[in-house]
Amino acid sequence: MKKIIGLDIGTTNIKGELYDIEGKLIDSLSYPYNIYFDKNSHVEQDAKDWLEITVRILNYFFEKYKFIKTVGLSTQGGTIVPVDKDINPLRRAITWMDARAGSQKDSILRRISADKIYKITGWKLQSSLPLLQLCWIKENEKGIFDKTYKYMFVNDFIQNKLCGNGYVDYSNASITMLFDIVKKDWSEELLSITGIDKSKLSKTQKSDIIIGNFKNEKLSKNCIDISFSNSAHDQYCVALSSNILDNKILLSTGTSWAIFANTQKPYFNKYYYSPGVHILPDKYGLISVVPTGGSVFSWFLNNFFENEESKISFLKSTEEDAENILNIKDDCIFTPLFQGSFGPIWSDKIKGSFENLSFDITRINLFKAVLEGVAFQVKWILDSMTKLGLKIDSIKMIGGAAKSRLQCQILSDITGLPVYLPKNMKLNYACRGAAMLAAVSAKIYKDFNTVNEIFKEEELIIYPREEFKSYYSEKFNKYLRVVCKNLQM
């Protein structure tokens, strides 16, 4: 039976999964790699690690299994590496988490307005994406800037190394702040600001095409005639494999929580949520984040418990007593804005807080308030999206928080929406989406509707409790008042 590989080059791990053409997972492999945290908000990776581990994973599958027909690629977005003519890195890659280029903002804004940047790229001006990072390299590493043959991203670097050619797909290009998401091409105006032209970047192309066959000498000889699909940004791969329809929101939970909607057009908006070009034909995505969605959960556990054993014991007891905890009604409010607010109101000055503490508030109340606070922030974002004209009738929730009955029920109660959960919590949606993309690119399936039917997963549904509707409506209004008060401090 034909087989498909889905690869995901993430921020901390590189993963590979092997599927058959009926959508069944056959095997998987994963390796971590280093992130270099240096002074002054520098966060870098070694592009040679991406290549070495990707080759190791591919060779594992190529040597062990027959009838592999194609490979698809999901990658982190906005991580950039300058290379020479042999596609060898001239320095470590500057990642999407790197904030060194904040000092470049003022000089950029003297040449182009922040609003115009947003209307071209779909991104509010920020230091962690390549527009400002290229300006930083030009100013601070002139030798590297002059030597650079091309500036590459994770996807086209790997494609060139493994196939001898490559593209930047539209979804990954949409994460660079250099791409015109309406024209679907690099923005000449923004590139002129960085001092480079289009020849310094790979050509852009849609995701569902074949790049070519594998040619790297370090790969197994068994890779002959196996095709490599063009890539896609990991969040778009996750959306594809989650079977998100137009009225269903994807909520990916981890250290940060990402909110993703399929749209028919690029939704430029006053909230500065980020539209980008989708994998799906004639579709766009719309992304917002709660950057501390998961990290405040870890913060609470790390600061309210002495050791790992006590954390595990507490979490186990809360899930066992979920019914009683879910029925608690109090005025304790938590705001999870530890790194500022990224919508609907933008502010890097606002801080997180607990409000309305009293002697009858226990650790359980505080824990529940943390779960509620993140859900309130999600609701606030979803409410603002509906004001843009999006119709939202449900949430698909994946990631670590989807395993918590408490968090899922609280989210459903607060948003008033049914929450769909994967029955199989071990699914890797990025690898799965990359495999689905590859299968369509290689014409194993005729279109994305067909592959979605083949890879369709079983789901559980959590429904909002009617008896908590008025309680959470009132408490949400209190949450908004607390946020607005903190904005004025």
Image: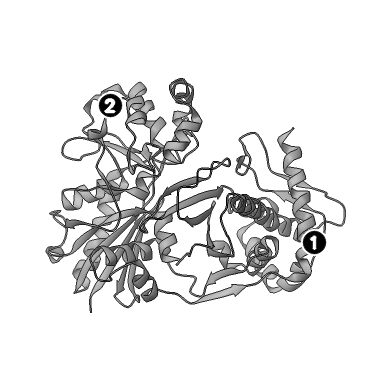
Q: Nearer the viewer, mark 1 or mark 2?
A: 1
- Relative horizontal placement of residue 452, taking residue 228 as reference (left or right): right
Tag 1–tag 2 contact (CB < 8 Å): no
- Indicate the amino acid at tag 1: Tyr
Task: Indicate whether 102 appears above or below 421.
Answer: above
- Relative horizontal placement of residue 37, taking residue 485 as reference (left or right): left
Mark 1 and mark 2: span between their CA atoms?
58 Å
Please provide percent x and percent y for residue 230.
Answer: 26, 55
Task: Indicate whether 233 appears above or below 312.
Answer: above
Say whether residue 305 is visible: no
Which numbered tag is attached to residue 145? Answer: 2
Please provide percent x and percent y for residue 428.
Answer: 42, 65
- Indicate the amino acid at tag 2: Phe
Q: Residue at x 22, y 72 (%)?
A: 64
Quarter of the figure with residue 16: bottom left
The N terminus - image quarter: bottom left
Q: Nearer the viewer, residue 102 or 65?
A: 102
Q: Residue at x 56, y 70 (%)?
A: 420
Please provide percent x and percent y for residue 426.
Answer: 46, 70
Secondary element at tag 1: helix
Question: Which residue is labeled 1 in the image?
Answer: 471
Say whether residue 143 is visible: yes
Task: Indicate whether 151 appears above or below 71.
Answer: above
